[in-house]
Amino acid sequence: MAVFTPVSDKDAQALLTQYNLGSLVSLQGISAGIENTNYFLDTTQGRYVLTIFEVLTHQQLPFYIELMHHLAQHSVPVPEPQTQRNGERLTTLHGKPCAIVSRLRGRHESDPGVTHCRLAGATLAQAHLAGRDFMLQQPNLRSLPWWQEVIPKVLPFLSAQQAALIQAELATQTRFFASAEHAALPSGPAHCDLFRDNVLFDGDHEHPSMGGFIDFYFAGCDAWLFDVAVAVNDWCIHRADGSWQPELLQAWLHAYAQVRPFTPEEKQAWPLMLRAAAMRFWVSRLYDFYRPREAETLQPHDPSHFERVLQARIQAGAPQLP
Ligand SMILES: Nc1ncnc2c1ncn2[C@@H]1O[C@H](COP(=O)(O)OP(=O)(O)OP(=O)(O)O)[C@@H](O)[C@H]1O
Ligand SMILES: N[C@@H](CCO)C(=O)O
């Protein structure tokens, strides 16, 4: 179980005195997730999730917490951060930042079909549009400057071939990010980690309904197209080699475009953005793999998967955006 910071019933009872959420019924550690400590927290008033932030600081967190609050207020299905009696939505537990958010219904779909892809695509476009008048600004902290910082640290662990690939791609992406083409892309608050395990669906496999998006703790202001690229690089591929499942890709992108049509600049930037999105997770997975932290149980994701996705995007590109 990825519980980095154990929380006792007594801790949770004391925490709940800061809120108007009733009293503790049950507390259960959540095994999924590699970044934060999460517990399901049931009270006499409802079902919540308690998150203790292991990496993010009190200074960085208001962006994520207030973004979720903003999106929830605009009817985008996301966890709603709960407000304490003192008006704050962020507090401290065992010396670390912590929040209680509403628990969404449903579970993630590891084998998504066309309907799941349509629902996810349409909801992401709604989230982008709803974020336009969000007042806080914070860049995606896992973007190009972070890759530039981290790649030298993981290079010693890579083969000569891997090192050549990652360095060549870093050079390509550095040029792309500095280009007028990139500057012209519509941008705003973006989830930046919309993998299939971060979207919950209610209903059964044949008749799913959207439960909501979770795990906003990599969100940041970025090109919306990056968000789309991150998502389809996970939702619409054959996992064995990263190649496309064209039917899923088409469903995802059309559903998104029906809510927010893609611009000509986005259509042009699409192949390079898909590579950027693959690069982002190859780098972070390498970093996580070679700097394991202590946890009761921790299984870092496989970095080589995104090496294959990146190679697939370089070699075969992508169908045009609708
Ligand atoms: N608001 C919520 N409502 C319902 N379930 C939730 C909620 N938040 C988290 N979960 C559950 O907890 C699991 C882990 O949460 P999450 O993915 O946010 O953890 P994390 O450590 O931040 O993840 P990651 O490793 O993906 O960064 C999810 O897969 C989901 O089952
Ligand atoms: N979605 C990320 C994990 C961080 O949320 C990955 O699969 O590497």
Image (cartoon, grey):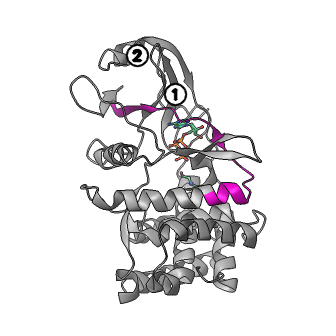
Q: Secondary structure at mark 1?
A: strand
**Looking at this view, is 19 or 301 the one in front?**
19
**Looking at this view, is 160 or 43 the one in front?**
43
Q: Write down the region rendered in magenta.
A: 94-118
Q: Is residue 268 above or below residue 293?
A: below
Q: Residue at x 47, y 64 (%)?
A: 153
Q: Is residue 167 above or below residue 82?
A: below
On the question of residue 161 being in view, the answer is no
Q: Secondary structure at mark 2?
A: helix
Question: Residue 206: x and y, percent?
Answer: 77, 48
Q: Residue at x 50, y 22 (%)?
A: 41
Q: Quadrant location of residue 289? A: bottom right
Q: Is residue 67 above or below residue 89?
A: below
Per the rendering, the mark at residue 11 is 2
Q: Residue at x 69, y 47 (%)?
A: 109
* Residue 294: in magenta span: no
- Is 3 on the left-hand or right-hand side of 242? left
Q: Is residue 219 above or below residue 319?
A: above
Disc nearer the start of the sequence (1/2)? 2
Disc 1 versus disc 2: nearer the observer: 1
Q: Quadrant location of residue 98? A: top left
Label 1 crowd (10 A; few <14 / some 14-19 / many >=20): many
**Looking at this view, is 39 or 134 the one in front?**
134
- Is 86 on the left-hand or right-hand side of 105? left
Q: Residue at x 42, y 46 (%)?
A: 75
- Is 4 on the left-hand or right-hand side of 20? right
Label 2 crowd (10 A; few <14 / some 14-19 / many >=20): few
Question: Residue 288: x and y, percent?
Answer: 54, 53
**Quadrant location of the C terminus?**
bottom right
* Residue 117: in magenta span: yes
Per the rendering, the mark at residue 39 is 1
Contact flag, marks 1 and 2 (Cβ < 8 Å): no
